[in-house]
Amino acid sequence: MKNIFITILLPLLLLSCVGKNEYKPVSVVCESIKIDSTITQISNPELEKTLNTYKQMLDKEMNQVIGKSALYMDKGKPQSLLSNLTADVLMIAGSKYLKEPVDLALMNNGGLRTVLKKGDITIGDMFSIYPFENSMVILFMKGEKIEELFEDLASQGGEGLAGCSFEFKAGELKKLLVGGKKVDKDKIYKLVTIDYLAAGNSDLEVLLDNIKRIDTDITLRSLMINYVQEMTLQNKEITSKIDNRAVAL
């Protein structure tokens, strides 16, 4: 598991008197203490005891096994097992949230920070793969803007997608289907993604040109954890596949 840092704030080390028995802080001192194998080198016994207590609690939580992966999953373009899995889960979650089917889902590879190994899946694994507090967003976009989106994705070599299939060659879009059908330029499509992309990041400014935006406070990480737990309750392992959703000709 990655190193964990706890910041100790000591805001009242330097005080200024502003009146009788009245003081205000004029300086804040912060110290970052890394909790790892070097924790035994901390000279303050009371502080070491406190940090060790929190570390043990955190380790217990992070090491909790919540499911099992049938495959080793990595990220990559034009598609990958891990990015496909994440987009699939986003699409499922978006449909549940709206209580009606969404049309497609989009996830960037940059938001996936490590691999999902074959075998046991822990809470810590989910935090390592999805370390950011990205939340689910649902965008309503006209078909013409969906086509522009995929022109951008073609130029970037693909990303994590669900609910669609597209082909591109030398950075140019050659074919696009959403729900197995050609895109209707005037139709309003429901796209589920994360707030980072919905803000136009990763050179996807076209996502800003939407008809309607629904923000949620549901993090991508919590969606993935819930999905793994639900599959485990059904005695199913987590799996993914490479298909025709993104094809470089």
Image: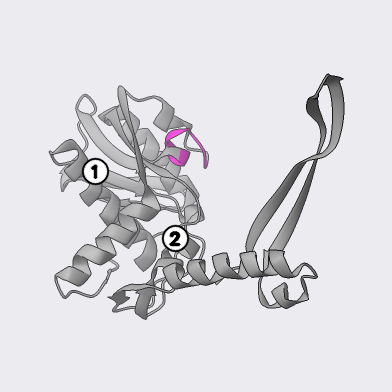
The residue shown at (43%, 68%) is 61
The residue shown at (80%, 70%) is 43
Q: Earlier in the sequence, mark 2 or mark 1?
A: 2
What's the residue type where badge 2 is placed?
Lys
Q: Residues within 10 Å of mark 1 (few under 14, many from 20)?
A: many
Residue at the spot of label 2: 77
Residue at the spot of label 1: 94
- Where, quadrant-wise, is the C terminus in this rendering? bottom left
Say what secondary structure mark 2 lies in: loop
Residue 153 relative to residue 247: left or right: right
What's the residue type where badge 1 is placed?
Gly
Image quadrant of residue 120?
Answer: bottom left
- Where, quadrant-wise, is the N terminus in this rendering? bottom right
Q: Is residue 147 above or below residue 249?
A: above
Residue 227 relative to residue 42: left or right: left
Percent position of residue 77, x then y: 44, 60
Q: Is residue 144 above or below residue 92?
A: above
Residue 76 shows in this picture: no
Q: Is residue 199 magenta?
A: yes
Q: Is residue 167 above or below residue 200?
A: below
The residue segment tinted magenta is: 196-202
